[in-house]
Amino acid sequence: MSQESAPVPGVDRPNVTVLDVIRAIVLVVAIATLALWGFATWPMPWNIVLGIGAPVVVLLVWALFLSPKAVLRLHPFLRAAVELLIYVGVTIAWWLMDQPFIGLAFAVVAVGAGVVSGRRNLS
């Protein structure tokens, strides 16, 4: 017996789509990649700084400009440019870790999800 929740007046629940889940996974992979890049590829004092700092910077940029309730609203094209800068940084991190195919696969999935989401938001 399924328990359907009754609609509550005044409460809007967002419709979560597969695209939203893919974009969330891309963000988590980007943060994990930058943490791995920082901790694994730099010598001792810098690995802690970059392993913690790079993901924190990406999270702050995402919260300021890209989140659904962003602090600063940007024009859709600037928003796409900020998102692309994050994706480029993660792709470069994979290339610097000598994993270019993982970097390319991440770039294709991330940019594809971003383009589809951007097109959906513009229409």
Image (cartoon, rainbow, N blue to C red):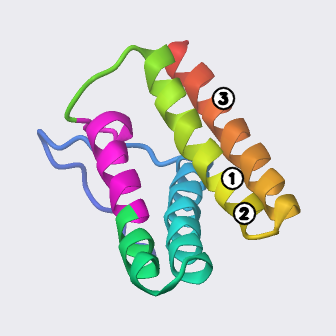
Disc 1 to disc 2, how far (Cα)? 6 Å
Which residue is painted at 53% across and 65% down in the image?
34
Q: For the residue marked with disc 3, what is the amino acid?
A: Val
Is 106 on the left or on the right of 93, as rendered? right
Residue placed most toward the observer, 65 or 15: 65
- Looking at the rendered image, the disc whose residue lies closer to the viewer, 1 or 3, is 1
In the rendering, at what x and y percent does residue 15 appear?
43, 43
Disc 1 to disc 3, how far (Cα)? 20 Å
Total tally of numbered discs in the picture: 3
Is 8 on the left or on the right of 31, as rendered? left
In the rendering, at what x and y percent does residue 115 appear?
66, 29
Q: Disc 1, disc 2: CB below 8 Å? A: yes
Residue 67 shown in magenta? yes
Give the magenta-colored segment's residue range.
54-70
Q: Which residue matches tag 1?
A: 92
Q: Which dot marks residue 115?
A: 3
In the rendering, at what x and y percent does residue 3 appear?
37, 71
Considering the numbered disc 1 on the image, is that residue within a helix, a strand or a loop? helix
Q: Which residue matches tag 2?
A: 96
Considering the numbered disc 3 on the image, is that residue within a helix, a strand or a loop? helix
Magenta span main SS: helix
Is 1 on the left or on the right of 123, as rendered? left
Q: For the residue marked with disc 1, what is the amino acid?
A: Ile
